[in-house]
Image: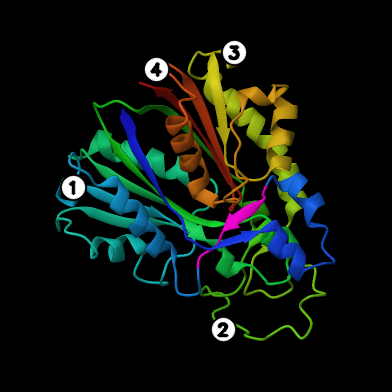
Amino acid sequence: MSIISNISIGLPEGLLTNKMISESRPSWNVNKASIRTGVEQRCISNDNETALDLAIKAVDKIFDSTLCPEDIDAIIFCTQTSDYIMPGNASVLHGKYNFRENIMAFDINLACSGFSYSLGIATSLLQGARMNNILLLCGDTYSKLISPGDRSTKLLFGDGVSCAHITKNVNGFKVLDTEYFSNGKNYERFIVKNGGSKNPIRKHFEYKNDKEQIVSDDPDFIDMDGIGILSFFNSRVPKAIYSIIENNNLDISQIKLIVPHQASKLAIDGIMKQLKLDESRFYFDIHNTGNLTSASIPLALSQLLHNDKIIKGDYIVCCGFGVGLSWSTTLLRYE
């Protein structure tokens, strides 16, 4: 068994508000789009700021009088925007602090389902290895993968990285169970086609008239089939939520809150409709940050703690879903 004992967040100082986008893109109906996304502003990194830089901000906050770098037994960094193709961000982060040499440090290439997947791996490590403390970093700088004229992604995503201290035998969110799912047949519904070994040569060009551009046709940037992704996860996520609840001999009425990946208001509304639950049973708040990929669920859990929205004994179901296509559910109890 493992416990999420603390969560910190590293966010860039830069902000991109709906007003700023509307002024630069007067042909976009930003107000209408914000109703569908639930995003009013998003945190955006500067040109030289990376997911690793944001992770350092988060790690600096997690260390205190009770936890220091020498206590850490493993570093897991879940990101799709690492500083380099090689080495991974976890290795580079290791060199920034006074960590021991006899610890694990590795990256996981996942996005919106990444927190649940990574949490499951961390839990297994704590159970099966001589480990007591794991740092789990999750997040991206998706703004660097967004075409300047792609309305669907530019209005949705922000940048940010979370840092969770995963340990055992303390108070916090107790991990009771995790379930995982994959559908690689639909991998192209969310993809960046260039930059890997299959298409290593990037085509760098500037748009002659990117103010008129509506979607990205440049394989250097994110290509998102928004409607296809929504349809797919509306048919899968509710079943996955019921699955983990029933497999742990609980009823959905016993779940205090469902904390889904903070994808968009439209996505969460679809899941609520399928589950036939009131919005008070869900936690959703991306108005000021945008969709933070794998950092969105830990940010939500951190907000629940700081806003006193949960009490001892509450059950929470987290559900991440996205790139892969992949999705995962985690059952937590606050202790």
Looking at the rendered image, the disc whose residue lies closer to the viewer, 2 or 1, is: 1
Q: Earlier in the sequence, mark 2 or mark 3?
A: 2
Q: Is residue 41 magenta?
A: yes
Q: Residue at x 70, y 22 (%)?
A: 278
For the record, the magenta segment spans: 39-45
Q: Which residue is mark 2?
A: 201
Q: Residues within 10 Å of mark 3 (few under 14, many from 20)?
A: few
Inter-mark Cα distance, 1 to 3: 40 Å
Q: Earlier in the sequence, mark 2 or mark 4?
A: 2
Left or right: 103 as drawn, with respect to 330: left
Indicate the position of residue 135 as horizontal and vertical percent values. Answer: 30, 47
Q: Residues within 10 Å of mark 4 (few under 14, many from 20)?
A: few
Q: Which residue is mark 4?
A: 312
Indicate the position of residue 250 as horizontal and vertical percent values. Answer: 52, 14
For badge 3, the amino acid type reads: Ser
Q: Residues within 10 Å of mark 2 (few under 14, many from 20)?
A: few
Against 206, residue 162 (above or below) is above
Q: Confirm whether residue 188 shows in the render.
A: no
Mark 4 lies on a secondary structure that is loop
Q: Which residue is mark 3?
A: 253
Q: Are marks 4 and 3 in contact (CB under 8 Å)?
A: no
